[in-house]
Image (cartoon, rainbow, N blue to C red):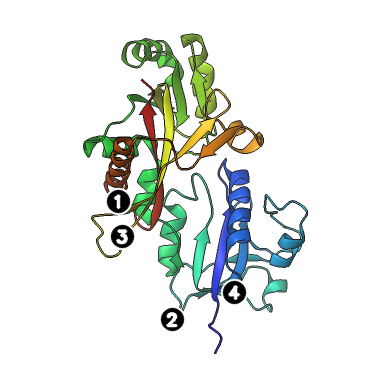
Amino acid sequence: MAQKKLRVAVLYGGRSGEHEVSLLSAASVIRNLDRERFEIIPIAIDKQGRWLLNDLRLIEEAQNKKSLPVVTAASPEVMLPPQPSPAHQGSALRALNASDASRSMPQLDVVFPVMHGPMCEDGTIQGFLELAGVAYVGCGVLASAVGMDKDVAKRLIRDAGLPVVPFLIERKVGWESRVDELRNRIASDLGFPCFVKPANNGSSVGVHKVREPAGLAAALKDAFLYDTKVLIEKAIDAREIEFSVMENANDPSQPLVSVAGEIIPHHDFYSYEAKYLDENGAGLELPAKLTDTQLRDGQRIAREAFLALECEGMSRVDLFLDRK
């Protein structure tokens, strides 16, 4: 007897500034999901926040295989009811338009949110899926929220006794009146160059390397387009080492940590352009060239960071190894 396929809703797009990045990530997920085990239900969220049931056949026939389309013209607008189904066997989508109401809406077994940035990977979509009573891939509400907020994540990791790069926080309200004071504080506490980053964003969107005090105001102005809180971080000459960390079902206190990979940017830093626009913007060395001691220390720190942020499932932890 053939095993019933799990219906996996791949949720992608979203209203954040990382919408286009999600289209790339979701294309990779759909390409690599095992069609013998999973039935794929692609659901696109456009930049206005509408949920659209896309056609997998049209996606697979599209010429651009690296990025998913958000098909709006012929796609039914759908919603997921924010309460569990009475049978507790997944949730069915509902069509919002009368003309689509007669169409059979698929029953979902699990949602795979392949989304980036605020209103996506920051605990918001995870909380909604909790309300709907639908199983989903990735970390839960708390871990997603604190992992998205660079300020909170760094404080939790620091309080767990792990090393963090020195940083300052600036708020949006009235920042222009404090910029001269902030320049002096950065020069005293961090030094230039420094990095300016939206606290709740990823993919290096809105991130700037500020080499001199004169460039601070412009960097802050752009970063505040994406968040009301900005992280200002000391620039260090370091190697970027990454680990995958997976929850250990047999012993939650001992998460499983992968071998190390090293991201080698070919730009000034690992910018949005280096990540997504320039095919030669960065390289990945796997496994990273580390001594046995460096590898053990890195895996220990990644494991402790995973626990400090209350992660579940699987996460990626990036560490910075000083070149000195």
Residue 137 picture location, percent across and down = 45, 61
- The residue sitting at 54% across, 82% down in the picture is 4
Residue closer to the observer: 27 or 148: 27
Q: Position of residue 253 (x, y in %)?
A: 23, 55
Confirm or deny contact between disc 4 and disc 1 (CB under 8 A): no
Label 3 crowd bin: few (<14), some (14–19), many (20+), radius 10 Å = some
Amino acid at dot 4:
Glu
**41 or 72, nearer to the observer:** 41
First along the sequence among labels 3 and 1:
3
Work out how far the residue at label 4 is from the one at label 3, CA to CA, in angstroms: 27 Å
Query: The residue under label 3 is which amino acid type?
Result: Asn
Cβ atoms under marks 3 and 1 closer than 8 Å = no
**Residue identifier under label 3:** 248
Precedes in sequence: disc 2 or disc 1? 2
Q: Which residue is mark 1?
A: 310
- Quadrant assignment for the C terminus: top left
Marks 3, 1: nearer the viewer: 3
Q: Is residue 47 visible?
A: no
Q: Nearer the viewer, mark 4 or mark 2?
A: 4
Residue 86 got which mark?
2
Q: CA distance from mark 4 to mark 2?
A: 29 Å
Q: Residues within 10 Å of mark 4 (few under 14, many from 20)?
A: few
Q: Which residue is at the front of the view, 306 or 261?
A: 261
Please tell me in which quadrant of the rendered image residue 205 appears: top right
Image mark for residue 36: 4
